Each structure stands twice: as C-alpha cells, then as structure tokens.
Amino acid sequence: MAVDERRRHDLYLALERLMGADQADSLMGLLPPVGWADVATKHDLNALEERMNLRFESMEHWFKAELEAGLRAQLRTMVSLVLTSLFAMASLCIAAITLAR
C-alpha cells in the first residue's frame, strides 16, 4: 500500500493526539519525504556494488591488455633498433679493418 499525503497527515494527527505536537513533528521529520519505493534498500546497494565491481574488473582487464600490447610494440621497436645499430656498427668496424690493411 502506497503512502500518500492524506495518509501521512492522518498519521500525524494520530501521533499528535497520542504524544503531542512536538513529538509528532519530530517523529514525522524522521520519515522520508517521498514514498518508500524511492528509498534504496540494502539489496539495491549490494546489487549496485556487484555491478560496480564487474565494471572495475572489466576496466582492469582492458587496461592490462592495452598496457601489455603497448609494451610488446615498444619492445619490438627497441629490439629492431638495437639490432640495426649493432649490424651498422659491425659493418663499419669491418669496413675500417679492411681499409686499414
């Protein structure tokens, strides 16, 4: 059963008769200003936590894959540059030795 403004007002009047106006005001102030359907439950929060954990895990896997791909590409580039430099230096040394004779 949904709680509407008429029911809230009836509840306030009953509380006012039982406890007085100040206590009724205090107690009504503790109630949410909207219907209970809009209030999050522990189940809602647990479901949200699970969805957030899944999102973070998927982002973590994506980030690791991107990082690994970038590092592999960088490693390939560095190895090819080092090998090219090594062969160039070896060729220069062989050429210098051959010319020195």
Image (cartoon, rainbow, N blue to C red):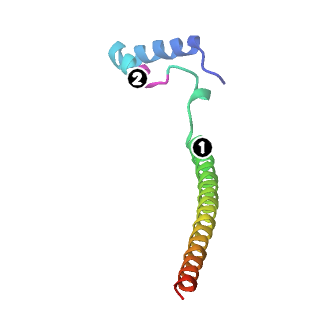
Q: Is the residue marked by circle 2 packed among few (<14), some (14-19), or many (20+) residues within 10 Å?
A: few
Judging depth in this view, the residue of 101 and 48 nearest the camera is 101
* Start-end of magenta stretch: 27-32
Which residue occupies 40% across, 18% down? 18
Identify whether 18 is placed above or below 48.
above
Task: Kindly give the residue lying farthest to the bottom in the view shown.
Answer: 101
- Identify whether 5 is placed above or below 61: above
Frontmost residue, 8 versus 78: 78
Q: Which amino acid does label 2 sit on?
A: Leu
Picture quarter with the C terminus:
bottom right
Q: Residue 68 carries which label?
A: none
| Cα–Cα gap, marks 2 and 1 | 30 Å
Q: Residue 25: x percent and y percent?
A: 38, 16
Element on which disc 2 rests? helix
Question: Which residue is tagged 2?
Answer: 27
Q: Where is residue 71 in the image (x, y as percent from the top left)?
A: 58, 63
Q: Quadrant of residue 30?
A: top left
Query: Magenta span has 31?
Result: yes
Q: Viewer-nearest of labels 2 and 1? A: 1
Judging by the rendered image, the residue that carries numbered circle 1 is 48
**Residue 63 location, x and y as percent?**
59, 54
Q: Give the mark, 2 or 1, whose residue is nearer the N terminus.
A: 2
Closer-to-camera residue (70/87):
87
At a point 58% along the width and 85% down the height, the residue shown is 98
Q: In this view, does 55 lie to the left or right of 28?
A: right
